[in-house]
Amino acid sequence: MNPLLAQFLAEANDLLAQVDEGLLQLERVPGDPELVNEVFRAAHTFKGSSGLFDFPELTRLTHAAEDLLDAVRGGRLTLDSGMTDDLLAAFDLIRGWLAHVTTHERLPASAGTDAAGLITKLRAPLGGEAAPAAARTAGVPAPVIDVAPDWLAWLDAEWLTETAAWLATTSSTLRFVWYTPDTDCFFRAEDPLHLVRQVPALEKLGVVQPEAWPAPEDYDEYTCMLSFVVVTRAAMGELNHLFRYVPDQIEIVELDSDAITRHLSGEPPLRAEEAVSVVVTAVIDSEVSADARAVLQAAHRALTLEGAVAEGARLRSVRHAVAAAAWALGVPVDVAESSPDELIATVVRLAGEAAPAPVAPIPAQLQTQAVAPHEEKEPVGRADDPGGQVGTRVLKVDQEKVDRLMELVGELNVAKNGLTFLADAAEEEFGSRVLSRRIKDQYAGLHRIAEELQAAVMDVRMLPLSVAFGRFPRLVRDLSRRLGKTIELVTEGEDTMADKDVIEALGDPLVHLVRNSLDHGIETSDERIAAGKHAAAKLTLAAVADGDAVIVEVSDDGRGVDPERVKRKAYEKGLISEEELETLTETEAVDLVFRPGFSTADQVSDLSGRGVGMDAVRASVEKLGGTVTMRSKFGHGTSTRLRLPLSMAVTQVMVFSVGGQRFGIPVDLVVETVRVPAGEMSRVLHQEVVMMRGEVVPVIDLARALDMPSTLAEGADRPILVVSVNNQRVGLLVEQFHREVDVILKPMEGLLAYADEFSGTALLGDGLVLLVLNMKEVLGLAARVA
Amino acid sequence: MPLELHDETANLVGVVTVDEVEQLAGWLRAAKRPKVSLRRCNHLHTGALQALLLFRPKISSAPNDAFLAAQVLPLLTGSSGPANKQGSDPP
């Protein structure tokens, strides 16, 4: 793919997200000028860069959106939700197009028709003023003969007269183009003159200069101040194609001799057009010249009326009138001695010149129109302006490259860990204590660097939680509209950072939770008012960093979970026994919603309630090494708390051995390691237990659970690893404790995928493969074995 | 190089792009009685044309390019008369 296009697509993503977010915020805080500006700028940038590629539909659609936003920005319109819907729809359509572009490098064939409807909708609040231009370019045939526009005045009258005559003789027409480039068009690599010179069969070119040039020292050579009047024999289609990227900056009319003559004679156009932007200076000028023209017409009538003014006083008065008119028009003539015939010739000549010719080089109004948008806009950074950099320089890097870097860091860690084995070997095998020490020193240095490198790479992978939260404003808005509930979404702690894998993996569980809240948790406005709550429900997404973990909480002030109902449902579905139905506490009852197959929803909606919700959430969070807990107060709301490790790339594991083989267990789970004299072990029912600080801790013989030979001697101290699983303490009887190591956990794949007892494998420094236990499954296994 | 700038004279050669606009405007600003030859110029960027229109240097020789000669030159030489086609070519 063209690198420029690839870059555009990458940026487009960001811009679209920005627009989406801005629009939603704007709906909440209508008229916030800062927000409007932000959205407008994003749309504007989007349109600008889309012009680089041959996607005219894209440019036109974004242009329509931009116009609407511009009107909002200018305070001419207030944004209502209908407009927001249209704008969102427009940008959604664009997102779809871009997905197509990503694979096919062109817009879908239906783009033109899809866009047309939206463009009309977007233009509608603007009074459809720009619609004709869009419609014309969209292929609707233009009326054959337009009304001569005011800007025809920029062409010199003599040429127009000749042309009109020729057109009358040949009964043909000419196309007139009025092209006012944007003042900042040079920044978009547009060269209006170049565009103009490409116009085929160019008949006449008029360059309109500003009324007053700025002083040379104030002159900004990058502001386009010129406008062009182009007269051509080229067909409408050719012109539309040529100017397809600047449809907003041009006006094309097709004129025949009548239209031009009418313009020349200063008669009002036959069809009253809403050409409100009548050139101001021309008006002032034409007041005088219109009088003059009237006088001349009267004189002409008088003179051509046979015999009416042949002689004497009548002739003198006509002469006088003509002279005065001529003077008013700025072309004094000496008619004192003219005969009636000469006088007629003079009048005809004067009438030609009396066509409203521009006196000042550019109409004041057009000038301000052209300059004003420029002033409103943010100062455009020049390509060569070194001070234009805003914020820090951001390097966009492919994710895969960062992943690769992370992998290499992992390899480095493994290689580094190999040094400690080498140090041991130096001492034990080669008997050199000194060498062992030096290797350990080297190891310490290498370790520090590797740690820092790892931290740096992790930092690169860190993303703010706002990435995960980003899609929710839209989701909540759409769903709440569909459900007819009023919901205010509050996000807190979006700038909390977490590893990108965590952020990505967080997406689906969060969507589940939010949907659940919207669908089941939050009541309708009527119910809320009846319950004495505020009509608008509050849904909070909050994130906080908690040491090595990040806590994400989804809470609402809805109806909460009814523990009795949950228990009853769970019992009905056979998830709990009758005793449990009686004995479960409220907290435990709430936790039932995480059981597979549980659903309290009486009806399955298309949002949630298919019974695959909460247990899927818990499963996917636990897969990430996190936990989910739910607290709920019936009638007052629910809050679900996800606790996830900040990073999943590197796991700290505690290594121990069982039956002569080494295993690992995530350090997070380890509470303590103890050696218990064999005599202190006791049995309760069939379960071995140990008393620790007044607490009975069940002990599981891992060797038995994993079906491995037990190598512990009778009567020797029992090494016990105390872990905490689901807030319960469990002791694991192992053979020997080893060190803690940082490993990169590789999931069990392929032939080993069925082995749920292990959460993954890791390579140790001495080349050994370490199996890391999945404690939950191991406990289940132990229960089955016993 | 599309711009050959001397003290009081300049040659515009080939296609004058937007990149040359700033330099040209700077030269026009500084020169007391600028003279510009368009003889070998094939195209002027709008920005360059605009600068020429603002500073109105004397056009010492007409462009060979048909479009420039027919449509652009009359603007630069003004309505005062026909283009000075006999102008000498600066070295």
Image: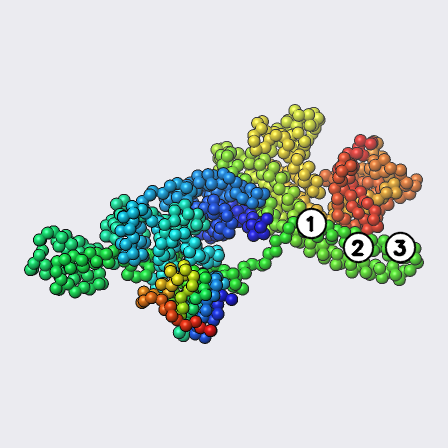
Q: Quadrant of residue A576?
A: top right
Residue A416 in picture, x, y percent from top left: 79, 55
Numbered circle sitting on residue A403: 1
* A627 horizontally vs A537: left or right: right
Nearest the viewer among A501 and A70 is A70
Please rate how many residues cluster around mark 1, counting C-alpha atoms within 10 Å: few if below 14, some from 14 to 19, many from 20. Answer: some
> Which subunit holds the residue at mark 3?
A
Q: Label 2, on which residue?
A: A416
- Amino acid of disc 2: Lys
Residue A10 in picture, x, y percent from top left: 57, 49
Q: Secondary structure at mark 2?
A: helix
Q: Secondary structure at mark 1?
A: helix
N-term-proximal mark, 2 vs 1: 1
For the question of whether residue A397 can be seen, the reply is: yes
Nearest the viewer among A372 and A50 is A50
* A454 horizontally vs A304: left or right: right
- Amino acid of disc 3: Ala
- Amino acid of disc 1: Asp
Residue A220 in picture, x, y percent from top left: 43, 64
